[in-house]
Image (cartoon, rainbow, N blue to C red):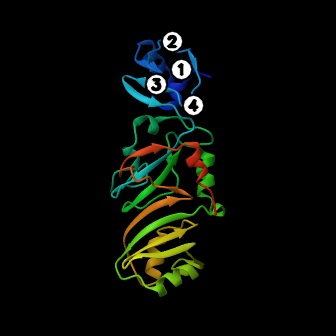
Amino acid sequence: MQRLDDLLFAQGFGTRRQCAGLIAQGLVQVQGSVCTDPAAVFPPQGLRIAVQGQPWECRSPAYLMLHKPAGYECSQRPSAWPSIYALLPAMLRQRPAAKGGRASGVQAVGRLDQDTTGLLLLSDDGAFIHRMNAPRRHVPKVYEVSAAHAVTAAQIARLLEGVVLHDDPQPVRAAACEATGSHALRLTLTEGKYHQVKRMLAAVGNRVTALHRSRIGQLALPADLAPGQWRWLDEAQLALLQPL
């Protein structure tokens, strides 16, 4: 159980004093009823509230997916393009660090280039972010690749065997690779080096013209989640984020 003012603070609705003021002014509903007592206690997980008329489902820690559109940077301080965090509600950006998190608000689990689209995970659980990013975890990530030139069997074979990138003496290889069209392929990776897909395609004499991440682990980007939209992850979906 958790005090309502603490609950609102943890969800990112402002400082504890601000949250207590919202409650005292009758601006907070809990399960459809106005509550004016900041000290009232409720079970926080999944609790449905409304603050100044804005509905919200309480989650702590926060685990969510975002369908990243092109033209957005995975950075809190973008340089040339808008930030993916601008696509999220203020509560997710303002909530205090939770469960090992070093910064306030949810953080992206890894990054996608500004021109890359698809499945991106975010959380304020620092331990979860670390586990998902750890190289030894070998969580597979599936990319749909559009190529400038026709994809050949020889290129696919080289990607599966391993290619040496310019600044890394150790070869990197695809966990799986298949052609999905004359100029398209599906590539599965279990490590996350800088611009890895683009550099691997370049190493076999081709070039990426469009890149989309469709899956992490066994979690696929839902067909009904439009670019720029986000959604909470439930326990079943979290269980799909497993290494090979």
Give me the C-alpha separation between circle 1 and circle 4: 12 Å
- The local secondary structure at tag 1 comes to helix
Query: Which numbered disc flags the more N-terminal residue, 2 or 4?
Result: 2
Q: Which residue is mark 1?
A: 4
Q: Which residue is mark 3?
A: 49
Closer to us: 234 or 97 = 234
Q: Which residue is mark 4?
A: 45
Residue at point 56%, 58% (across, down): 218
Between tags 2 and 4, which lies in front? 4
Confirm whether residue 162 shows in the render. no
Give me the C-alpha separation between circle 2 and circle 4: 19 Å
| Residue 159 in picture, x, y percent from top left | 52, 80
Query: Which numbered disc flags the more N-terminal residue, 3 or 1?
Result: 1
Relative to 163, 86 lies left or right? left
Give me the C-alpha separation between circle 2 and circle 3: 14 Å
> Pointer 3 and pointer 1: residues touching (CB < 8 Å)?
no
| Residue 155 in picture, x, y percent from top left | 47, 84
Between tags 3 and 1, which lies in front? 3
Q: Amino acid at mark 2?
A: Asp
Q: Which residue is mark 2?
A: 37
Give me the C-alpha separation between circle 3 and circle 1: 10 Å
Query: Which numbered disc flags the more N-terminal residue, 2 or 1?
Result: 1
Confirm whether residue 35 shows in the render. yes
Q: Amino acid at mark 3?
A: Ile
Q: Is residue 54 above or below residue 133?
A: above
Q: Amino acid at mark 4?
A: Gln
Q: Say which quadrant the C terminus sits in.
A: bottom right
- The local secondary structure at tag 2 comes to loop
Q: Residue furthest bottom?
A: 154
Around disc 2, counting alpha carbons within 10 Å, would you say few (fewer than 14), some (14 to 19), or many (20 or more)?
Answer: some
